[in-house]
């Protein structure tokens, strides 16, 4: 496989650097978080559930950012009851067509604490934020694979190499071939029970759509929800691996790390 690499530098921070910096950012946020009991209690319950699989404080993942929810319902006297009901029974429509599943395992008091914490969030306020998927990179990575140029929004290979994949792609390979292969086929070659994900991405599926399906699932097609099992970052890594396979930059078998 003949692969050449060209990077278009529109920003100075790559995804890999972001992964290294993220723990420091979260650590600083934790040190400055407001120690209000309603906030810390509700946030702790949210993190113990699957809330942060589909939401983050500042960033849309599958569902809206918690701060956007707080802004939308600011000043609404019925906000607590509305949101408690949505979490308890599930909801779709307010933020698009992707449904939020019900959460019957949460008690009424736990759900109310989560809602109270969400509504306490203000734009610019300090919060630990959970774990959001890496934001889409503004840097384009162009690779020449067997004479054809392909461009993706994340690095497939380590700097200076056309054979050694990034940690994100390698972790995606490991996770995919530990779980996803059972239905989607080993090495993302397609399976008997579920679609060939390489074809899905080649036909236009975006990373946001990929993440939504993975986290929410498709019950009508037998696809389970992975919210609460995988983090958004892990889903991004699986996406990166499958995308690298779909453009032909990574072959079958274990990639070189």
Image: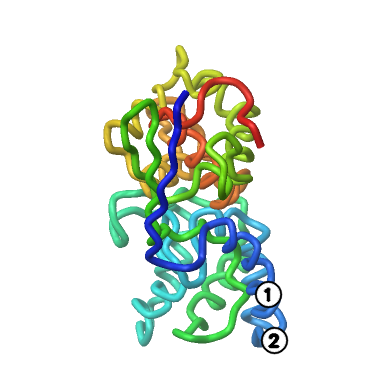
Q: Nearer the viewer, residue 165 or 246?
A: 165
- Disc 1 element: helix
Occupied quadrant, residue 9: bottom left
* Residue tagged 2: 35
Instruction: Describe residue 110's horizontal placement relative to residue 153 as left or right.
Output: right
Pick the residue in front: 158 or 25.
Answer: 158
Q: Residue at x 47, y 23 (%)?
A: 1
> Quarter holding the C terminus?
top right
Residue 185 percent coordinates (x, y): 51, 18
Mark positioned earlier in the residue sequence (1 or 2): 2
Label 2: element kind = loop
Residue 182 at x, y percent in the picture: 57, 20
Residue 41, numbered label? 1
Would you identify the image quadrant in which residue 38 lies? bottom right
Residue at point 68%, 83% (across, down): 37
For residue 40, side relative to residue 180 (left or right): right
């Amino acid at each position: 496989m003949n692969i050449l690499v060209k990077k278009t530098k529109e920003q100075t921070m790559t995804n890999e650097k972001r992964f290294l910096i993220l723990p420091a950012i979260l650590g600083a946020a934790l040190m400055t978080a407001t120690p209000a009991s309603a906030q810390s209690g509700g946030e702790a319950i949210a993190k113990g559930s699957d809330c942060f699989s589909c939401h983050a404080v500042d960033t849309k993942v599958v569902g809206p950012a918690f701060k956007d929810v707080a802004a939308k319902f600011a000043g609404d006297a019925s906000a607590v009851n509305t949101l408690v009901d949505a979490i308890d029974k599930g909801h779709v429509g307010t933020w698009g067509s992707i449904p939020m599943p019900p959460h019957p395992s949460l008690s009424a008091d736990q759900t109310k604490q989560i809602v109270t914490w969400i509504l306490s969030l203000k734009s610019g306020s300090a919060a630990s934020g959970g774990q959001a998927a890496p934001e889409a990179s503004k840097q384009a990575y162009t690779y020449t694979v067997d004479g054809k140029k392909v461009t993706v929004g994340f690095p497939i290979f380590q700097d200076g190499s056309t054979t050694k994949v990034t940690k994100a792609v390698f972790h995606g390979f490991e996770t995919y071939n530990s779980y996803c292969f059972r239905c989607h086929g080993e090495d993302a070659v397609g399976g008997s029970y579920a679609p060939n994900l390489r074809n899905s991405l080649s036909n236009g599926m975006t990373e946001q759509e990929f993440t939504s399906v993975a986290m929410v699932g498709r019950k009508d097609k037998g696809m389970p929800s992975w919210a609460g099992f995988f983090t958004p970052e892990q889903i991004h890594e699986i996406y990166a691996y499958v995308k690298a396979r779909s453009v032909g930059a990574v072959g079958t078998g274990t990639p070189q790390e």
